[in-house]
Image (tube, rainbow, N blue to C red):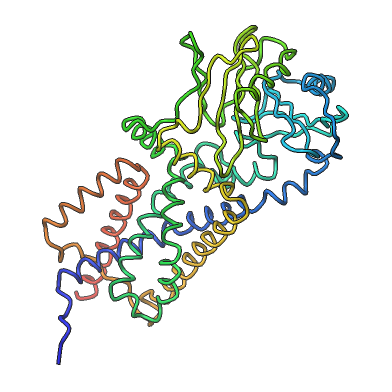
Amino acid sequence: MTTTAAPSRTSFAWRGLLMRLHFYAGVLVGPFILIAALTGVLYALTPQLESWIYSDQLRVPATAQQLPLSTQVDAALATSPKGELVAVRPAPEPGATTRVLFAEEGLGESERRAVFVDPGTGRVTGDLVVYGSSGVLPLRTTLDQLHRNLMLGEPGRLYSELAASWLWVVALGGLVLWFSRARKSKRVKVHGLIGVWTLAGALFLSATGLTWSAYAGENVALLRTAVGWSTPTLKITGSGEGHGDHGTSTPAPSAGGHGEIDEVFGAAKGAGLDANGVEISLPAAAGGPWKVAEIEKGLPSQGDSVAVQGGNVVGELRFADFPLGAKLTRWGIDAHMGVLFGWPNQLVLLLIGGGLVALVVLGYRMWWKRRPTSGFGRPTPRGQWRKAPREALIGLGAAALLAGWFAPLLGISLLAFLLVDVLLGRKAKAAETQTVH
């Protein structure tokens, strides 16, 4: 007859310490994760809805022949737009409109005014404010801002960074608890199973979300630079001038005309830019180089760009030449947005987001049932760290400091959790002392 060795006092201490951290993170950060999951799912699932809502601007009868791009730009300019012409996105497919983009005073960061033109007739079908390098329309712009900062501007970004900073900690902590004795409890069985199945997705969303964050994002950029994984910039042959690819930055207004745009577009096609989605950015100064970039999302990746001046290609940047880290960043961001694999990508995000919502809701349900006054159970008592080996605590503290430095909001909130725990412990101890006396 074989016997199973009882778990050591140390293993109990580690499990208790982890449960305490998991408890605090879940209770205090859970609302932020819940909001981020809900708004993220809404954003990922709206491209089809957006195409339907804005069909008058986006769709026109397909024609065999298209007007020259310069003529389409003339049609947009005839509407007397307020801003400066900065770029043109030719119709990506038959039945789609061309977008003529203007930098307009009063618009937000990364926003541009798009005038939509029927490439077959030159008829203007409308104008809308578009956002970011993806050129999303007002519906998804609203959802993007809600997901990013709760529409509170820069201060609101702290919420999403806090959620991304803690998501991986909560997910990995839950995994360890599940593979310890926690999975044997009926109360946490469903919660744990959902956590296990959504673990990879949660880690992915946390890592990619941090690349956009205000503080941890800076450290991610520094790390990418240090290991040579930064996204390269388009260089102009024979000069020190470069066109940085900053994703959502608004190009400088053109100091020249748009008469060369057909020649520029033809030169870019001749250089191998054959993606359906292309953006042609006007030069920042008269006679300067134009930039033509493929803007197709998804796989196979099409992210080449060229500089054209005087009808000649004077610089090129091929996605195939990107460092691996830059490629992974691009693929990760596109997958996070739900555009890398098309509708399967959207479905996966729906499942992950739904799983995170369920985890938060079930976690609060367990917390409510296990509160001391419920009679159902008790949360893990304080003081678990005193039972763990000192050497291990030092290592854990060093790891926490490193993680807190890399993701400052994680470190600050962790200190806040510990402070709250200490204060609550002292309050409980004082109340117990008064009761005894």
Query: Could you say where residue 267 lies in the image, as x and y percent from the top left?
Result: 65, 19
Q: Name the outermost residue toward the bottom.
A: 1
Query: Could you say where residue 226 lies in the image, as x and y percent from the top left?
Result: 31, 30
Examine the image and state in which quarter residue 273 appears.
top right
336 lies left or right of 206: right
Q: At x 81% / y 30%, what residue is drawn?
A: 117
Q: What is the quadrant of the N terminus in the image?
A: bottom left
76 lies left or right of 302: right
Q: Observer-nearest residue: 328 or 58?
A: 328
Is residue 85 depicted above or below 47 in this figure? above
Q: Is residue 239 shown to the viewer in this render?
A: yes
Q: Observer-nearest residue: 424 or 253?
A: 253
Query: Could you say where residue 91 lies in the image, as x and y percent from the top left?
Result: 74, 33
Q: At x 78% / y 39%, what residue is drawn?
A: 58
Q: At x 20% / y 51%, what residue is drawn?
A: 397
Q: What is the quadrant of the C terminus in the image?
A: bottom left
Instruction: Give the tally of numbered discs.
Output: 0
Query: Could you say where residue 76 lies in the image, as x and y percent from the top left?
Result: 81, 23
Is residue 136 depicted above or below 377 in this figure? above
Q: Observer-nearest residue: 237 or 422?
A: 237
Q: Observer-nearest residue: 420 or 285?
A: 285
Examine the image and state in which quarter residue 171 appears.
bottom left
Examine the image and state in which quarter residue 428 appears.
bottom left
Q: Is residue 163 shown to the viewer in this render?
A: no
